[in-house]
Amino acid sequence: MQHPESDSSAAPATETSARRRPLPGERRAQVLQALAAMLEAPGAERITTAALAARLSVSEAALYRHFASKAQMFDALLDFIEEALFTRSSQIAAAETEPPASKAARIVALVLQFCERNPGLARVLAGDALLLEHERLQARANQCFERLESQLRQCLREAAQQAGSAAPSADAQVAASTLIAFCQGRLQRYVRSNFRRLPTEQLEACLARMM
């Protein structure tokens, strides 16, 4: 799993490190990485804890020493998504030297680029991986988009004010809603095309047309 703008390269494990028994925090991370990797498989169906344990060559009981349930594993993936996206998007929104419309475009690009680098997490954020899981998880994924829309609305209200809009709040609401719908549509297309149709396809041209 990669953060936005992260370096995807990693040093290969040495023979010594490969034999070392993972620490509790490392095993937890391995479980999440394995789950995310399984979600990247084209046409992946609902993932069972038995299949996840088999991929890691451990028992299901070993998984439950780190997570009380599979729902808790998805919660941890959503924690990662939120930390990765909102740390960076908040920094973008707070930048004082950048035009507000440009900040909104960068937030949209951030979301789509993150999902392109992390196909398994794209399935979680799009809700596809959560269809047969606890409905609370789907609600939490929806809240991610609501928070992003709020950030976009803030940027776009300022842009509308600078442009002399007579109703900056209303204009910002419409523009933010349109951009979020675009994000969600791009993610759904990415997931349902088995990750062939990239969410960043012609992104600059699309944003220029919408903005």
Image: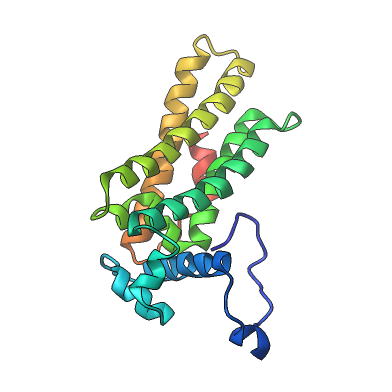
Q: Work out whether residue 167 or residue 34 is closer to the camera in this orientation and state it.
A: 34
Is residue 157 toward the left or the right of residue 56 in the image?
right
**Image quarter hosting the N terminus:** bottom right
Task: Give residue 27's position: percent from left, percent from top.
Answer: 52, 70
Task: Give residue 18's position: percent from left, percent from top.
Answer: 60, 85
Colour scheme employed for the rendering of this structure? rainbow
Q: Work out whether residue 111 or residue 159 is closer to the camera in this orientation and state it.
A: 111
Does the rendering let one see residue 41? no
Is residue 72 toward the left or the right of residue 200 in the image?
left
User: In percent of the image, x 33 and y 50: which residue is there?
Assistant: 127
Residue sitting at the far top: 166
Task: Give residue 109's position: percent from left, percent from top.
Answer: 55, 47
Residue sitting at the far bottom: 15
Q: What is the quadrant of residue 159 in the picture?
A: top right
Does the rendering let one see residue 6? yes
User: In percent of the image, x 52 and y 41: which residue is there?
Assistant: 207
Q: Work out whether residue 128 or residue 76 is closer to the camera in this orientation and state it.
A: 76
Q: Is residue 51 above or below residue 128?
A: below
Q: Is residue 134 above or below residue 97?
A: below
User: In percent of the image, x 35 and y 67: which residue is there?
Assistant: 194
Is residue 98 toward the left or the right of residue 198 in the image?
right
Q: What is the quadrant of residue 146 in the picture?
A: top left
Is residue 55 toward the left or the right of residue 103 in the image?
left
Task: Give residue 78's position: percent from left, percent from top.
Answer: 45, 50
